[in-house]
Amino acid sequence: MDEKAKTEQEKKLVKELEKLSFEEALQKLEEIVDGMERGNVPLEKMISSFEEGSLLASVCQAKLDTLQKKIEILRRDRQSGSLKWAALNAPKQEEAPSPGNEKDEDTPF
């Protein structure tokens, strides 16, 4: 398979994997790792499993990063007195900590 076809196939796989929920992607990744750890997978299958596992790990990390940003936005809005979700691409608003509560950013909720 030439590089261009492989890249197109990888892009298609990434789009499919991005449709999975975080839990589904993580479960699939765990299944791949379990199969590889058992060692009864032919070399070619192990390589393709490794590639798919790497893509799944990237998808899971991207989903976690997105959720972390949402939580940070929700926490920031909570400090201002309102609980609302803000767009991830909204400009970051720096807020001064509440008086006597300088470590408020370390408090999860």
Image (tube, rainbow, N blue to C red):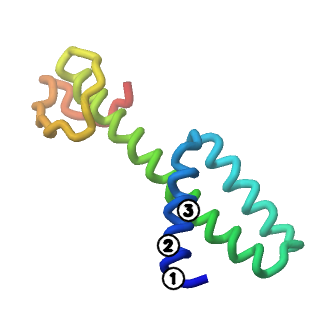
- Where is residue 57 drawn, in percent x and y? 56, 58
Give the Cα separation between the discs numbered 2 and 1: 6 Å
User: What's the residue type where badge 2 is placed?
Assistant: Thr
* Left or right of residue 13, residue 78 in this image: left
Quarter of the image containing the N terminus? bottom right
Q: Which residue is mark 2?
A: 7
CA–CA distance between discs 1 and 3? 17 Å
Foreground mark, 3 or 2, reads 2
SS class of the residue under badge 1?
A: helix
Q: Residue at x 22, y 40 (%)?
A: 89
Residue 66 on image: x %, y %: 39, 43
Q: Nearer the viewer, residue 12 or 71?
A: 12
Q: Position of residue 48 (x, y in %)?
A: 69, 72
Q: Are marks 1 and 3 in contact (CB under 8 Å)?
A: no
Instruction: Write down the residue under mark 3.
Output: 55
- Asked if 84 appears above or below 31 in the picture, the reply is above
Disc assigned to residue 3 = 1
Q: How many marks?
A: 3
